[in-house]
């Protein structure tokens, strides 16, 4: 964590999020990890930190591996498909599962929906996300080594988001500290799709905190001193 807090200011970041994998992933931390994040300072080096989770969509109904007791310790949740947890299905099956997660009320962001291993019906997913105020993540790691071939699918998601006037989040998905805040490909593809900066909710700390408040996560009082210095 110290590495991330030290490098973040060098990247011009004011706010970072820690979102380790949910319990059903083979590399996941023990569930107690998510409660123990409270020991990490909220602000270090003038960089604020949010406590999150990248939960797993684990069945066609869109159920997530977030125990009810965990919600009190989390500021937000990303819901994602991962091959060790959910076997890729048809576009119809994947879409049903993804929309189930969106409708569950347990997540605020759908993680790397441009994964080519999980085809989806773009219009249905984006419309459901907008109806339930859930963001679609454009994941910079997807353009590199994590999910090879994601580029055209991420572009289609961005174009569909523009079509329905919806919103996204950008994620660096940095599994190593020096990659935190790397959004180069996210920006490149957003520009290709004609997405405006206003549609990127994570582009500004205050904007993302306002979004989380819409989901019942009021954090501004806790970050009052930090916000006053932005």
Image (cartoon, rainbow, N blue to C red):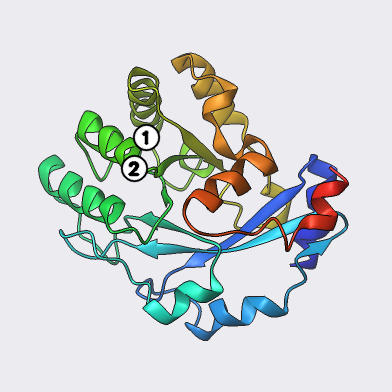
Q: Position of residue 109 (x, y in %)?
A: 43, 49
**Residue placed most toward the observer, 93 or 216:** 216
Decide: is 32 above or below 176.
below
Q: Position of residue 132 (x, y in %)?
A: 33, 44
- In front of the other: 134 or 31: 134
Q: Earlier in the sequence, mark 2 or mark 1?
A: 2
Q: Is residue 203 left or right of residue 46?
A: left
Other-residue count near label 1 (Cα within 10 Å), few / some / many at <14 / 14–19 / ≥20 = some
Secondary structure under tag 1 reads loop
Q: Nearest to the eye among marks 2 and 1: give it.
A: 2
Relative placement, left or right, of 194 versus 63 is right
Left or right position of 139 against 118: right
Numbered tag placed on residue 90 in the rendering:
none
Label 2 crowding class (10 Å Cα cut-off): few <14, some 14-19, many 20+?
many
In the image, residue 184 sits, relative to residue 27, either above or below, namely above
Relative side of 210 to 179, left or right = left
Splitting the image into 4 quarters, where does residue 100 fall? bottom left
Cα–Cα span, label 2 and label 1: 8 Å
Q: Quadrant of the C terminus?
A: top right
**Residue annotated with mark 2:** 115
Residue 103 x %, y %: 26, 52
Measured from the top left, where is residue 209 in percent x and y? 62, 48
Residue 149 numbered tag: 1
**Camera-nearest residue between 15 and 226:** 226
Q: Quadrant of the N terminus?
A: bottom right
């Amino acid at each position: 964590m110290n590495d991330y807090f030290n490098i973040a200011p060098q990247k011009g970041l004011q706010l970072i999020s820690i979102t380790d994998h949910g319990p059903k992933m083979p590399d996941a931390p023990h569930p107690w990890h998510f409660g123990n994040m409270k020991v990490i300072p909220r602000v270090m080096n003038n960089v604020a930190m949010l406590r999150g989770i990248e939960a797993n969509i684990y069945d066609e109904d869109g159920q997530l591996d977030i125990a009810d007791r965990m919600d009190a310790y989390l500021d937000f949740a990303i819901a994602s498909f991962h091959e060790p947890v959910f076997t890729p299905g048809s576009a119809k099956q994947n879409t049903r599962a993804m929309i189930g997660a969106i409708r569950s009320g347990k997540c605020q962001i759908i993680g790397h929906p441009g994964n080519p291993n999980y085809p989806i019906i773009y219009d249905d997913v984006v419309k459901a996300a907008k109806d339930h105020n859930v963001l679609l993540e454009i994941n910079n790691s997807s353009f590199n080594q994590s999910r090879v071939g994601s580029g055209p699918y991420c572009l289609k998601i961005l174009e569909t988001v523009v079509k329905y006037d919806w919103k996204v989040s950008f994620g660096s998905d940095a599994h190593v500290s020096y990659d935190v805040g790397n959004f180069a490909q996210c920006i490149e593809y957003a520009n290709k799709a004609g997405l405006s900066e206003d549609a990127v909710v994570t582009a500004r700390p205050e904007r993302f905190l306002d979004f989380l408040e819409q989901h019942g996560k009021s954090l501004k009082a806790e970050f009052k001193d930090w916000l006053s210095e932005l």
